[in-house]
Image (cartoon, rainbow, N blue to C red):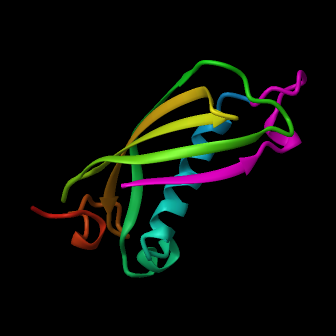
Amino acid sequence: MQHTIDIEVRYYETDGQGIVHHANYFQYFELARVQMLKALGHDYAELERQGIFLVVHSISARYIAPAKFGDTLQIDTTVERATAARIDHSYRVLRGGVLLAEGKSTIACIDEKGEIQRMPSILYHAD
């Protein structure tokens, strides 16, 4: 599964030189994941009401070129692997077709007590 969103870089996401601060890419990745989930027909808030909490197990980014205030960015998100234990995503951040950053994350599922639980089958395709 792949999903794409567009976002405009806001001033507060940048440093004194107008360049996106590196930590904001993780927020972009989260926004992209939530929007992908929504596109699949799942409301994250509703999942949490059902006791399904999706948490970041690990996340990384590789920066290639800077994004700047006012840029429109395309965030491509791909589900690389989805199982009952985890969902692995990859991300590509582009501006006008130029690759600016790449990332990866692994998402796990916990209950309201913080205990690890199996990923609901609605969130992955069981073979």
Figure label count: 0
Q: In the image, what residue occupies the spot 55% across and 62% down? A: 35
Q: Is residue 6 left or right of residue 83?
A: right
Residue 74, position in %: x, y? 64, 44
Q: In the image, what residue occupies the spot 26% across and 51% down? A: 86
User: Relative to 47, is 127 above or below?
Assistant: above
Choose between 117 and 66: the one closer to the eye.
Answer: 66
User: Relative to 90, is 6 above or below?
Assistant: below
Is residue 11 shown in magenta? Answer: yes
Q: Is residue 58 left or right of residue 73?
A: left
Q: Is residue 124 left or right of residue 6?
A: left
Residue 38, position in %: x, y? 50, 70
Residue 126, position in %: x, y? 14, 64
Choose between 124 and 12: the one closer to the eye.
Answer: 124
Q: Residue furthest front?
A: 97
Q: Which residues are magenta?
A: 1-20
Q: In the image, what residue occupies the spot 55% across and 52% down? A: 4
